Image: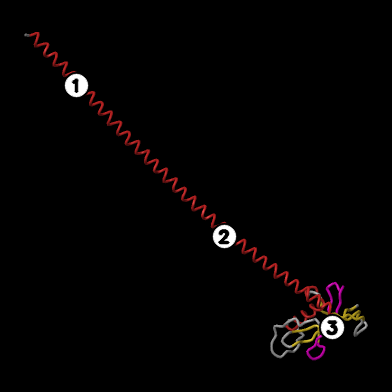
């Protein structure tokens, strides 16, 4: 009986031991599964988040690049438009300048055709006399009844010099005025030269109402 009882207890211990091993194995397996699932969820979630963040960053970068490209295109279009407008303005300005030069050349040609040059003149110091029916009044800023004013600070004096410069071709900046005075009603006469006195002239001008002083005769002088 004692032998059977020992064997029975031994068998029960072995059975409990096997059961504990199985349970422990199952518990370990469950723990491993839990760790595996948790790790997958954690790291997988981070990877998904990282991927989402990368995709969002890439999308934002693409959007910014597209906006930049669009801005550059608009800028280039505006620059092209500005260049076209500038070229058009320059072409128009050049055309106007060419037209003005052509008109001036035509006027000069017309004046040359109408110009009459004779040797000598009103005095022994006159080398030759030039008259030209194509000469025109130089214009005026004055209005009302006109009276010649021989004052260097007066507008009338400046307009007389403009007429003299127009008739002789001597720029006022290179002009020395030796005399400018009355030559009868609405008429004046001036004696001028270039600053180096290589050119010397006596110029007769007449007042045209509303249009200014008009050259009537130029005498080329051999002495002042």
* Tag 2 secondary structure: helix
Q: Which of the two discs, 3 and 1, sits closer to the camera?
A: 1
Residues rendered magenta in the picture: 182-202
Viewport quadrant of the C terminus: bottom right
Instruction: Residue 172: give x, y in percent of width and height.
Output: 78, 75
* Residue shown at 86% from the left, 77% from the top: 200
Instruction: Measure the alpha-carbon separation of dots 2 and 1.
Output: 85 Å
The image quarter containing residue 119 is bottom right
* Tag 3 secondary structure: strand
From the image, tell me which residue sits under label 1.
Answer: 20
Mark toward the start of the polypeptide (2 vs 1): 1
Q: Does the magenta stretch include residue 49?
A: no
* Residue shown at 26% from the left, 26% from the top: 29
Instruction: Measure the alpha-carbon separation of dots 3 and 2.
Output: 57 Å
- Along the viewing direction, whichever of 66 and 181 lies nearer the viewer: 66
Mark toward the start of the polypeptide (3 vs 2): 2
Name of the residue lying farthest toward the left: 1
Q: Is residue 191 magenta?
A: yes
Mark toward the start of the polypeptide (3 vs 1): 1
From the image, tell me which residue sits under label 2.
Answer: 78
Q: Where residue 217 is drawn, which disc sits there?
A: 3
Left or right placement of residue 11 versus residue 196 in this view: left
Viewport quadrant of the N terminus: top left
Q: Are marks 3 and 1 in contact (CB under 8 Å)?
A: no
Q: Which of the two discs, 2 and 1, sits closer to the camera?
A: 2
* Residue shown at 82% from the left, 88% from the top: 183
The image quarter containing residue 175 is bottom right
* Tag 1 secondary structure: helix
- Along the viewing direction, whichever of 64 and 113 lies nearer the viewer: 113
The image quarter containing residue 130 is bottom right
Left or right placement of residue 178 versus residue 146 in this view: right
């Amino acid at each position: 009986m004692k032998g059977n009882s020992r064997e029975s207890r031994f068998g029960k211990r072995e059975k409990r031991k096997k059961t504990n091993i199985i349970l422990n194995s199952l518990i370990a397996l469950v723990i491993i599964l839990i760790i595996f699932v948790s790790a997958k969820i954690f790291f997988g979630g981070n990877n998904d988040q990282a991927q989402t963040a990368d995709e969002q960053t890439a999308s934002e970068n693409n959007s910014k690049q597209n906006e930049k490209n669009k801005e550059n295109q608009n800028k280039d279009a505006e620059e092209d438009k500005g260049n076209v407008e500038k070229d058009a303005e320059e072409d128009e300005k050049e055309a106007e300048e060419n037209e003005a030069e052509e008109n001036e050349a035509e006027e000069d040609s017309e004046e040359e055709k109408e110009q009459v040059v004779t040797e000598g003149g009103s005095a022994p110091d006159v080398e030759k006399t030039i008259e030209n029916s194509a000469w025109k009044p130089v214009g005026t800023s004055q209005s009302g009844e006109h009276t010649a004013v021989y004052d260097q600070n007066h507008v009338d004096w400046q307009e007389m010099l403009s007429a003299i410069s127009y008739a002789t071709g001597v720029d006022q900046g290179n002009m020395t005025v030796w005399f400018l005075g009355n030559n009868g009603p609405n008429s004046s006469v001036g004696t001028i030269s270039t600053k180096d006195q290589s050119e010397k002239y006596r110029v007769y001008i007449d007042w045209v109402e509303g249009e200014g002083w008009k050259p009537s005769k130029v005498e080329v002088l051999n002495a002042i």
